[in-house]
Amino acid sequence: MELTRYILRRMVLSAFVVLGVTFLVFIVAQVVPSDPAALYAGPRPTAEQIEKARQELNLDAPLIQRFAGFAKAMGTGDFGVSYKSRRLIAEDLRAYLPATLELAVFSTGLALLIGIPLGVLAAARQGKWPDRLGSFGSIAAVAMPTFFLAMILQLVFAQWLGILPLSGRLSREISVTAPLSMMTGFNLIDALLAGRLDAFGDALKHLILPALTLASYPAGVAMRLTRSAMIEILERRHVTAARALGLSEPRILFGHALPNAMGPALTVIGLSFAYALTGAVLVEIIFAWPGLGRYVSEAILAKDFPVIAAVTMVVTICYVVMNLLIDIAQALVDPRVALS
Amino acid sequence: MTRLVQRLGWPGTIALVVILLLVLVAVLAPWVAPYPQQGVGVPNVAAKLSSPSAQYWLGTDHLGRDMLSRIIYGTRISLTNGVLIVAFSLLIGLPVGLAAGYFGGWIDEALMRGTDVFLAFPALLLAVLMAAALGPGFLNSIIAVSVTWWPWYARLARSEVLVLRNQPYVEAARLAGVSHGRIIIRHILPATGRPLTVQAALDVGPALLTAAALSFLGLGVLPPTADWGQMVDAGRKFFPARWWYSATPGLTIFIVALAFSVLGDALRERKGGTARASA
């Protein structure tokens, strides 16, 4: 009962947040810029063209009416046309969103895969050098500018070692010579569905560096959270009992302690996903990753406000939905959350 | 000095020294920079993209300007960025949080739900949207980041006030007929000050990191003013052949942010170490 009420309350609040987000995006994208009509009319517009654009954009209508129109368009997925390319934004989003999501999901997995074992190791060797090194690493990961880490990884793995591609999402041999048919838009899945192992390997290689860049910070957080949860659990009686039974140390750590320390994993998933969506703007530029981040950064330079507004809306809604799901999952796993 | 080391530990002390040095360098930029003219932005085309040498310790950029001087002048922009972002955010967040916590009820609900809307955005994306709408520039980029930053202070201030609101001395003031405004400013604000000041000082690091990301995207200070994020971006065209162009300002950002991060860690650990009585 308490649980259902909590979930319902969170859903209603999220709906209000989405409405607020829509309003804020509307204000920033349509009211703050000095003259959207001049931008819409194209380069060096005449006074007539601007006037025509004003009417097309309905800029003379009252603010409330304009907002209602904007909210309705966003709600129906009609994001309008790009000022610059005159293409339908919804179509562009369909091409770019999967690329960004693929990166976000992959980097989240990577963060857990790196952070949790390191956290276990740090807890097992508490106060020794692996612990200290790990702690420093997780602090350093917070301070590292995303764009700088990306460039270092490119320098080391693509330029010096030459084992991973510098940028892009697929090699030219795949994307031009034998392109994948787009089904889900996730290259890894599309390659598997088509039974193309060459394309799968190629897509995977291209994913590693950008995903690693995005995973560094959440991996640091995952390490810290796992470490402190493990330290607490290693002092519990069932662990002592397992020790008394003479079980091997790895078996105690991974078989008996870690499953009880998995609480933070959900927090990390949410945080990592959010971080990937934010960091995408920077990482996708550097790795020439054809996703939302690069799309929006090009739109910024062109002052293409409909595109900026659409991307902000879509990404923020992904973010809100993700947070809602995490909150619900956390309440299901640990019903005490719903009561507090 | 020994007491300081005792309190912060060695890493914390080193971090504090780095930050103080940074402030000093920013203030004394014209005297510390080897080529102050180039630091400000005057080109020196004869020495275009020279690698690090005795003459140019960190090499030169595509206009031949000494990287070290540029980085030293960039300190001014980065630090003011960080400080002003935090100051602006406090200016918005503090009143919101104080009012929400003190009055409670529908005022609290309305203010905090509004705050939630700002927190619902991925922070960098909202800053990018703001900065794109306002146009690039020093002040605009600061406003853009502050818009994403203030909700944290609103939350922090609110949680502090919730504790203080029912303290006997506040109730006494209320019974004595002191006005709400005066209670908030004279009795509650000074008590919330300490935790907020510490938090704010530590936030200068992450704030300047975010500002650097914006200027990397071309939404910060415009050239020829030296700015670290913008320098990393400008050097990308010459990377990795002329690695120093991007690497030196990038490394500087990392070291500065790291110093703030380590100092914050040291302070938090100390707080946890000295067992505070039920606070």
Image (cartoon, grey):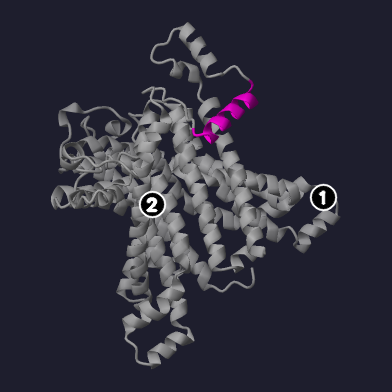
Residue A121 shows in the view: yes
A133 to B205, vertically: above or below: below
Residue shown at 45%/18% (left/top)?
A40
- The percent position of residue A126, horizontal first and vertical second, equals 37, 77
Most common SS among magenta residues: helix
| Extent of the magenta region | A62-77
Q: Does the magenta stretch include residue A70?
A: yes
Where residue B178 is drawn, which disc sits there?
A: 1
- The percent position of residue A304, horizontal first and vertical second, equals 42, 26
Q: Looking at the picture, which amino acid does disc 1 mark?
A: Val
Residue shown at 30%/29% (left/top)?
B41
Q: Quadrant of residue A58?
A: top right
The CA span between labels 1 and 2 is 44 Å
Residue B28 shows in the view: no
Q: Does the magenta stretch include residue A168?
A: no
Q: Is residue A237 left or right of residue A87?
A: right
The residue beneath circle 2 is: B257
Q: Looking at the picture, which amino acid does disc 2 mark?
A: Ala
B220 to A319, vertically: above or below: above
| Chain of the residue where label 2 is placed in the rendered structure | B
| Chain of the residue where label 1 is placed in the rendered structure | B
Q: Which residue lies furthest to the front in this view?
A: A194
- The percent position of residue B133, horizontal first and vertical second, equals 48, 29
